[in-house]
Amino acid sequence: MDLTANIHREDGGYWADVPELPGCFASGKTFDELFDSLLEGIELYLEDEEGNGGLSMPLQVKAAVLSDAIPA
């Protein structure tokens, strides 16, 4: 399963949404915190949707950086 994470920088931290999973958001003070939170949020979202308590397919998240303020 391929998902896109739209990443934004705001107030010294980062947040992201996943367009393919409406209502799935994550935040973090660093990119590492953001991605940890994002993966956890995606897993929880999919567990809720599938109702089986786990992912049934490999997960790959592709980041789409939207904010010009995010350093390379």
Image (spheres, rainbow, N blue to C red):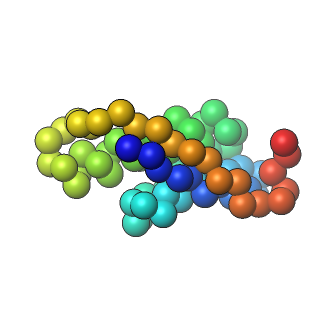
Considering the image in quadrants, where does the N terminus appear?
Answer: top left
Residue at the left extreme of this rendering: 52
Q: Is residue 66 above or below residue 42?
A: below
Q: Residue at x 19, y 38 (%)?
A: 53
Q: Is residue 52 above or below residue 65?
A: above
Q: Is residue 42 left or right of residue 47?
A: right
Q: Is residue 10 left or right of residue 19?
A: right
Residue 8 image position (x, y, % from top left) = 69, 58
Residue 30 image position (x, y, % from top left) = 69, 39
Figure label count: 0
Q: Is residue 29 left or right of residue 67?
A: left
Asked whether 65 or 40 is in front, the reply is 65
Q: Residue at x 63, y 33 (%)?
A: 32
Asked whether 49 or 10 is in front, the reply is 49
Q: Is residue 46 left or right of residue 35?
A: left
Residue 17 image position (x, y, % from top left) = 53, 59
Q: Residue at x 29, y 48 (%)?
A: 46
Residue 22 falls in image quadrant: bottom left
Residue 34 image position (x, y, % from top left) = 59, 42
Q: Residue at x 45, y 46 (%)?
A: 2
Residue 72 falls in image quadrant: top right
Confirm whether residue 39 shows in the render. Answer: yes
Confirm whether residue 37 shows in the render. Answer: no
